[in-house]
Image (cartoon, rainbow, N blue to C red):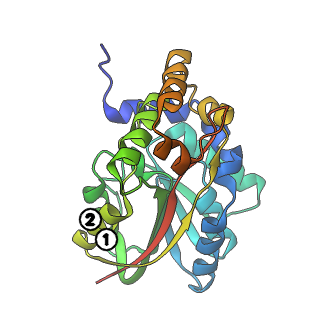
Amino acid sequence: MSVRTHAGHVVDQFGAQASAYVTSAVHAAGADLDRIGALIRTMPGARVLDLGCGGGHVAFAAAAAGAAVTAYDLSGEMLAAVTAEAGRRGLDRVETRQGAAEALPFPDAAFDAVLTRYSAHHWRDVPAALAEARRVLKPEGLMVVCDAVAPEEPLLDTHLQAVELLRDPSHVRDYRVSEWRTMLAAAGFAPGQALASRPRMEFSSWIARMRTPEIHVAAIRALQTAAAVEVTRHFSIEADGSFLLDSVLIEARPH
């Protein structure tokens, strides 16, 4: 029986694969990153928090757009990889801090923007993390949440959570868009514009990033093979297990 905490699972899963997330094609590009860069370019001299920075792609985009960025993550190995990559890119305005999303070591109103991308589905307490994001954000600041999301239909939602957990034991939940809007509002934000996308998860690289055990890979493939036609169609599940993942970027402002 495992005795690791959830935080331990996150560090174990991502620390050893830090370089894979820096180079991951899925994480390194996309309309959502383009949108983040465009937003930050409208905020000259901004101080930005990349919350749950992972491989640092949001931090790099924000720094390239002119911001001073604090890349924040639970994994020290991930932060080291971000620092190294920022150096390779000549981005000298990226600093790192280590810790959990639910307890930010920053003063109130410290940032002009708080950005998070493909991280929140690993957080143990998203409402607490959003409350902390609201606390450290200036009253006129910008919050951007980008993450994989579950479809609103329970049949599709259940399939997604099952394969996500089999792939990665640190997975908590891909929230529905309706859940995101409710949680943002409860934390003191007014959710605004949303940008939807459906990136393709190429199966072999998707499981390789998490070093998914073969027994879990087999279970994922069994679930996909046995899935109802509605599930297969929605996720566009291919013969090799590759599929489309619903994602959304939501812009929000404090209210």
Work out which residue is located at the far top of the displayed protein and give it. 1
Work out which residue is located at the far left of the displayed protein and give it. 186
Q: Residue at x 46, y 51 (%)?
A: 119
Q: Please state which amino acid type lies under the numbered disc 2.
A: Ala
Q: Position of residue 8 (x, y in %)?
A: 38, 30
Q: Residue at x 76, y 58 (%)?
A: 89
- Dot 1 corresponds to which residue? 134
Q: Is mark 1 on a helix, strand or loop?
A: helix
Q: Position of residue 51 (x, y in %)?
A: 45, 58
Relative to the observer, which residue lies in front, 200 or 61?
200
Q: Is residue 113 above or below residue 61?
A: below
Q: In this view, does 83 lie above or below 141?
A: above
Mark 2 crowd level (few <14, some 14–19, many ≥20, 10 Å Cα): many
In the picture, measured across the screen, residue 112 lies left or right of residue 139, that is right
Q: Is residue 88 above or below residue 252?
A: above
In the picture, measured across the screen, residue 113 lies left or right of residue 104, that is right
Which mark, residue 131?
2
Q: Where is residue 60 in the image (x, y as percent from the top left)?
A: 65, 62
